[in-house]
Amino acid sequence: MPEPGKTAGKLRFAVIGAGMAGLLAGIKLKQRGETFTVYEKGDRLGGTWRENRYPGLTCDVPAHAYTYSFEPYAEWRAFYATGPEIQTYFEMTAEKYGILPHIRFNNEVTGCQWDEAQACWHLRIGAQETAIADVLIVASGVLHHPNVPEIPGLESFQGLAFHSARWDDAAPLDGARVGVIGNGSTGVQLVTALSTRAARVVHFQRSPQWIMPVPYFEYSEEEREAFRKDPGLIEAIRNNKEYWESIFRFTRAITDSHGEDIAAIEKICLENLETSVRDPVLREKLRPDYRAACKRLIYSWSYYEAAQRPAVVTERVGISAIEPAGVRLQDGTLHALDTLVLATGFHADRFIRPTEVLGRNGISLDTAWCPRPTAHYAITLPDFPNFFMLNGPTGPVGNFSLIDIAERQWDYIEQLLALLRDGSCRAIAPRHSAHEAYEARRIAAAKNTIFGSGCKSWYLDATGVPSSWPWSYEAFAAAMKAPQLAEFQLEIPANTGK
Ligand code: NA7
């Protein structure tokens, strides 16, 4: 007899998160006629594109590459897409593929517990509700938990102060005095956008950034019409040889910190600084003092121009405190402000947490992830059977499309799901020995990447080791083509006698 709610031979799937990756999982499951529910704690889908609404929000991966491979989009207005456009794309795609009825909005998964006897997961939804799933697809995002800095006096600020991912529409911007703390992709995009709107933008930069110049152009209506008529034109952009070569060069650069590829990237960025920034004092303020690509490279066609606009003040002196009137620097200067934006990044090591996840023998994810979050080939975890992560710990990060990464990860997951579907096993998780060997190899390689060359960034785990895929893009693509089944422990159904 199947357990309650289960049709014989049918797996029940729970997808956690309705962002880019959760939506991908939903589409793939729907196409196979699977039984699934997507749990989303917010009231809209879109993940990071729902949460971030700051002025200037743009994806730094070319728009036609930041789309699902099976759903090209002719309507992008420019080579790089804005946040609202991307949000619209995901909403339209969810509707087109019939995913919306499967999403339970405002439903936070607060707990997941593995049931060894039944080989299924018991989910707690919100405070009281429960659900059962044979397979968990964890697509809960990476840059999701805002890092709010502990700066003395922050609560005393009289104007509006908020994190960039918690945008306050009431905040004065036009003609106002706006402070931006933080100089990652968010801070740079924000300052660029505000440079033509605010009376004064004070950009508090603890670390200057490497700025990679990139082309920017808008697609004309004629071009969009051509894309609509012939999606092959979009495919040609996605498969553009130069684009892929730049990705391969980038991953070679990050994996070989003494190689010629990273030297070439540094040279391009430095030339950009020298030729774009006219004032020598500002140029020195903006000159990075660590290796290029150690932090995520900033791709921008307009930041240096924005930084030279009269409204923009680039401040490199450290912050001593926040006062009711504004930000006080360590040299005693007070920058009086109306609005203060904390573009200070995210706690990138949380993943699905604070959801309480208990695997085999009650082992918690917190325990399994001490001292660092790990996953076998960034997807599965020993002791957590039928638990598959998309864009989980140690996956590739860098200046390329995470949609492409998630799609390749899904291909890998599909091959493991096939074993559950055809009854070869009822539970699957990587063996400890295989995962430990993999992690040892990964950590050794990660320490030699450019991410480990001495700067501080969200790419590092709590022990200072880069938490990303440390090998080439090609190696990742090859690994995703075929999971090494010998590395997995398969639990065989008792009644098959296998
Ligand atoms: P990031 O890239 O993590 O950048 C955070 C920025 O905030 C960075 O410049 C930090 O300086 C700065 N920061 C953090 N805490 C403080 C304090 N306490 N005081 C001053 N400055 C601080 O986050 P983003 O949101 O810009 O981008 C995240 C990703 O989103 C990005 O990589 C893309 O993948 C999309 P630091 O460099 O540590 O000196």
Image (cartoon, helix red, strand yellow):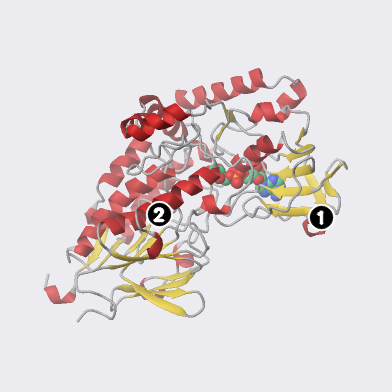
The circle on residue 157 is 1
Q: In this view, does 483 lie above or below 252?
A: below
Left-right relation of 414 to 47: left
Quadrant in which residue 229 is drawn: top left
* Callout in the foreground (1, 2): 2
Confirm whether residue 185 shows in the render: yes
Crowding at mark 1 (Cα within 10 Å: few <14, some 14-19, many 20+): some
Q: Is mark 2 on a helix, strand or loop?
A: helix
The numbered mark at residue 118 is: none
Query: Mark 2: which amino acid?
Result: Ala
Q: Please indicate, yes or no, whether residue 466 appears anywhere in the rendered image.
A: no
Quadrant of the image for the N terminus? bottom left
172 and 274: which is toward the camera: 172
Q: Position of residue 425 (x, y in %)?
A: 20, 66
Count of marks overlaid on the render: 2
Q: Residue 50 placed where, x, y %?
A: 54, 53
Left/right placement of residue 437 relative to residue 299 reads: left
Seen at 77% across and 24% down, the residue is 281
Q: Estimate the x, y position of residue 3 in percent, counting from the top left.
A: 26, 80
What element does badge 1 sit on? loop
Q: Quadrant of residue 387?
A: bottom left
Q: Measuring 32% from the left and 32% from the top, which residue is drawn there?
A: 230
Residue 37 appears left or right of 485? right
Camera-nearest residue between 358 and 193: 193
Q: Residue 94 carries which label?
A: 2
Is 314 left, or right, of 219 in this rendering?
right
Q: Which one is in front, 279 or 14?
A: 14
Q: Which residue is drawn at 46% across and 54% down?
A: 19
* Kind of residue at disc 1: Phe
